[in-house]
Amino acid sequence: MTLWTGINYDKTLGGLVGLSGYLFQFADIDNLPQKRYEIPIYIGHGEMDPMVDFHYAKKGYERLLKKFKNS
């Protein structure tokens, strides 16, 4: 939820911290205003998290790495 809300928020943010979550598959991160790609993003996720599979978190992280400068 942090990632989706943060990258779509219309105000300038100092950064995003995503813990034990993932980037929604339907999230369009290709057509954001340029300044959003400069938001620093930190993602932390345990490999053994019983609620959110690590695979989903890793997939979202890899998508973010391609677009965001500070991931």
Image: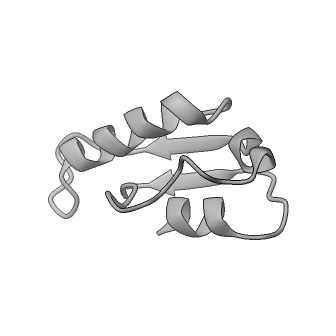
Residue 42 falls left or right of residue 15: left
Residue 5 falls left or right of residue 25: right
Q: Residue at x 19, y 64 (%)?
A: 51
Question: Considering only vertical position in the picture, is 26 above or below 49?
Answer: below
Q: Residue at x 80, y 47 (%)?
A: 35
Question: Considering only vertical position in the picture, is 9 above or below 45?
Answer: below
Tell me the quarter of the image containing the C terminus.
top right
Q: In which image quadrant can residue 70 be found?
A: top right
Which sits in the foreground, 10 or 31? 31
Question: Considering only vertical position in the picture, is 8 above or below 16?
Answer: below
Q: Residue at x 48, y 57 (%)?
A: 28
The residue furthest right is 12
Image coordinates of residue 53 in percent, x first then y, are 18, 52
Image coordinates of residue 41 in percent, x first then y, are 62, 43
Q: Residue at x 70, y 70 (%)?
A: 9
Image coordinates of residue 14 in percent, x first then y, are 81, 52
Which sits in the foreground, 12 or 33? 33
**So how many labels did they put on this image?**
0
Which sits in the foreground, 14 or 66? 66
Look at the image and name its color scheme: one colour
Residue 37 falls left or right of residue 71: right
